[in-house]
Image: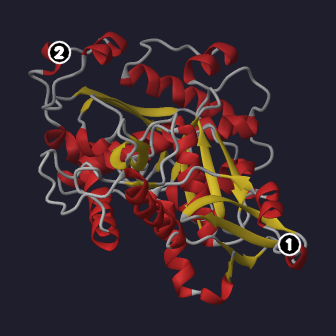
């Protein structure tokens, strides 16, 4: 069995938008090195300054180097019939495969990650970066952060792993399509094995324990595995592989609850890799106040933390549309609703404040009447409870689980005290109302 131990230097973190600046390949027969190849590569991308400082490779060094397309045939011949080995193999493999494909070569080989192998075969070490491993194991590691030096050091590490592999870990990794090969190098496989096949929300954490991504799933285990089940070259995939050190999860009784919890958790944690749903927080609210003449006025304004709005909207246009409905329905004054600035509001026989405020109060009651209060009851996580999503006056109050449905549904205050409050937003609200309209039999009105 022959191994191609590969290391590359690049202009960035993901293959689809970056180039290779250097490649080193060590051919290893399981005992010793039998061939070595190294070449600078012109990436036809400018090399960022911080990478120049890290690797020592600057733009002038690669200006006259061959492009990857010029050496692709030689690279492919060296590695195509061997086991592809690298320290954090998914990174190197994604770049080499992507750039070989661009040159017309289809790479499809088995892979081994020396980070994952070292964790299994050499447990209990202080760290598993290439620098720490070479220092701990006494491996000669010249030319740090250069492709040739790192590839030779990784080959020596592979020799040690193969010699100490008394539990046949390497062969286990190579059997069939071992899903562990696709995992982030620092992620314990136990984190994946313990995931349930139920609805819920999952969390990816970086080395510092900060959540970097939150996702929802109908089947947590299957969804998490799908993040690592291929070798995509896009930025998010490679960031996940590089940064994920731990995974946790929260089970939910239903897929709807998973959707709600995901949205709430994104707003609580603001993970760096969650880019969707950021625009769903309501920005405007319908407020009422009394002016100096004693008239109750309405206004759609930016949400203010110090004042609770009658209702919230994602856009000011939605709020003005609702205000115009109130004007038509209850004969309110457009000027007193801040829909026009002109003193000539067009109202005939403008009523006195007391009479006008009666109409304003009717409008407020009309809004609240048309904003339902109900509980959406569904199956629980087990047979001993029921899931409950509570909407109060058209806004999501929260969700949780009831263990005595008949008794607890008699009193809305009991439900409020039982479930967990959540921040409302248009996205969640629309999900809940859509589900309630599709399954009216699950709704308990208050």
Query: Disc 1 designates what residue?
Result: 385
User: Left or right: 272 with respect to 346?
Assistant: right
Q: Say which of marks 2 and 1 sits in front.
A: 1
CB-based contact (under 8 Å), mark 2 and mark 1: no
Q: Residue at x 36, y 48 (%)?
A: 297
Residue 197 lies, in percent from the top left, at 70, 69
User: Left or right: 47 with respect to 94?
Assistant: left
Q: Label 1 neighbourhood size at 10 Å, few (<14), some (14-19), many (20+)?
A: some
Residue 403 lies, in percent from the top left, at 89, 70
Mark 2 and mark 1 lie on one chain; the one further toward the N terminus is 2
Q: Looking at the picture, does residue 164 appear above or below residue 183?
A: above
Q: How is the image coloured?
A: secondary structure
Question: Label 2's element?
Answer: helix
Q: Residue at x 17, y 51 (%)?
A: 103
Residue pushed farthest left?
64
User: Left or right: 284 with respect to 160?
Assistant: left
Question: Label 1's element?
Answer: loop
Query: Disc 2 designates what residue?
Result: 61
Q: Label 2 neighbourhood size at 10 Å, few (<14), some (14-19), many (20+)?
A: few
Query: How many badges with numbers are in the image?
Result: 2
Q: Distance of mark 2 from mark 1, alpha carbons?
A: 67 Å
The quadrant of the picture occupied by the C terminus is bottom right
Residue 218: tell me if it is visible: no
Residue 240: tell me if it is visible: yes
User: Left or right: 253 with respect to 391?
Assistant: right
Q: Looking at the picture, does residue 30 appear above or below residue 384?
A: above
Q: Residue at x 46, y 66 (%)?
A: 362
Q: Residue at x 31, y 58 (%)?
A: 351
Observer-nearest residue: 83 or 54?
54
Point out which mark residue 92 bears.
none
Observer-nearest residue: 341 or 174?
341
Residue 435 lies, in percent from the top left, at 54, 78
């Amino acid at each position: 069995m022959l191994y191609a131990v590969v290391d590359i230097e690049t202009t960035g973190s993901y293959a689809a938008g970056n180039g290779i600046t250097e490649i080193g390949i060590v051919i290893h027969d399981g005992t010793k090195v039998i061939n070595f190849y190294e070449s600078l590569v012109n990436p036809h991308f400018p090399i960022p300054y911080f990478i120049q400082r890290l690797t020592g490779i600057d733009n002038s060094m690669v200006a006259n180097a061959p492009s990857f397309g010029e050496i692709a045939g030689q690279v492919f011949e060296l590695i195509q019939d061997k086991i592809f080995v690298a320290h954090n193999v998914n990174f190197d493999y994604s770049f080499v495969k992507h750039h070989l494909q661009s040159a017309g070569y289809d790479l499809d080989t088995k892979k081994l990650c020396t980070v994952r192998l070292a964790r299994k075969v050499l447990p209990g070490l202080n760290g598993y970066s290439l620098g720490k491993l070479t220092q701990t194991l006494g491996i000669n590691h010249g030319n740090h952060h250069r492709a040739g030096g790192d590839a030779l050091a990784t080959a020596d590490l592979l020799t040690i792993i193969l010699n100490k592999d008394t539990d046949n870990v390497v062969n286990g990794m190579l059997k069939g399509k071992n899903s562990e090969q696709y995992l982030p190098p620092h992620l314990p496989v136990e984190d994946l094995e313990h995931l349930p096949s139920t609805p819920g929300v999952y969390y990816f954490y970086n080395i510092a324990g900060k959540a970097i991504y939150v996702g929802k799933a109908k089947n947590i285990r299957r969804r998490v595995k799908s993040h690592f089940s291929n070798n995509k070259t896009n930025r998010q995939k490679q960031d996940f592989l590089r940064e994920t050190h731990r995974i946790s999860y929260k089970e939910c009784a239903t897929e709807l609850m998973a959707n709600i919890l995901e949205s709430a958790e994104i707003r609580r944690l603001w993970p760096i890799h969650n880019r969707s749903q950021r625009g769903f927080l309501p920005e405007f609210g319908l407020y009422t106040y009394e002016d100096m003449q004693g008239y109750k006025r309405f206004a759609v304004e930016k949400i203010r933390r110090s004042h609770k709005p009658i209702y919230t909207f994602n856009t000011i246009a939605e709020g003005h549309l609702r205000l115009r409905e109130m004007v038509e329905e209850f004969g309110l004054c457009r000027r007193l609703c801040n829909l026009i600035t002109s003193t000539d509001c067009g109202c005939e026989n403008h009523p006195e404040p007391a009479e006008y405020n009666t109409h304003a109060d009717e409008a407020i009651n009309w809004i609240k009447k048309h904003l339902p209060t109900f509980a959406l009851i569904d199956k629980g996580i087990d047979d001993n409870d029921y899931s409950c999503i509570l909407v109060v006056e058209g806004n999501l109050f929260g969700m949780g689980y009831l263990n005595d449905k008949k008794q607890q549904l008699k009193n809305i205050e009991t439900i409020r005290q039982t479930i967990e409050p959540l921040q409302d937003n248009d996205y969640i609200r629309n999900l809940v109302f859509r589900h309630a309209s599709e399954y009216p039999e699950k709704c308990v009105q208050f």
